[in-house]
Amino acid sequence: MELRKYIDTLERGKAKELAEVLEVSSSYLSQMASGKTAISPARCVDIEIATNRVVTRKDLRPNDWFKIWPELAAA
């Protein structure tokens, strides 16, 4: 699932909680979700964990995930 869609499904205030778990500001989380800010590979892993794999690394980096995490391609 795309990060923006995930955030849109959250109850009021839960996006702020997600930002706190990720140790980023709410506005930075919004920038990542909108595509204005690139999401680093390490941050992708953090998001995947924080969303209980609802948003995956593949979702966050659809064009290059297989280069960063080749072990996922084999699975």
Image (spheres, rainbow, N blue to C red):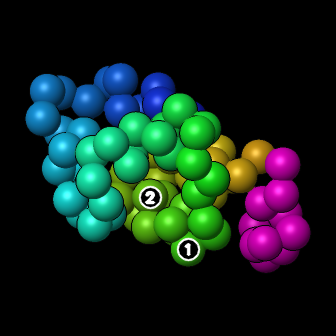
Q: Which mark is residue 47?
A: 2
Q: Give how far across and how far down residue 22 sits, in percent.
A: 32, 63
Q: Is residue 42 magenta?
A: no
What residue would you read off at disc 1?
A: 42
Magenta extent = 63-75
Q: Which mark is residue 60?
A: none
Q: Give how far across and how far down residue 20 sits, in percent.
A: 20, 59
Residue at image coords 55%, 74%: 42
Compared to residue 72, the image places residue 48 above or below, namely above
The secondary structure making up most of the magenta span is helix
14 sits left or right of 49 in the view: left
Query: Along the line of sight, which residue is nearer the eye, 4 or 53?
Result: 4
Q: Is residue 67 magenta?
A: yes
Q: Give how far across and how far down residue 49 sits, in percent.
A: 41, 64
Residue at image coords 51%, 66%: 43
Q: Residues within 10 Å of mark 1 (few under 14, many from 20)?
A: few
Q: Amino acid at mark 2?
A: Ile
Does dot 1 land on a helix, a strand or a loop?
helix
Can the viewer see residue 52 in this picture? no
Does dot 2 land on a helix, a strand or a loop?
helix
Quadrant of residue 1 in the image? top right
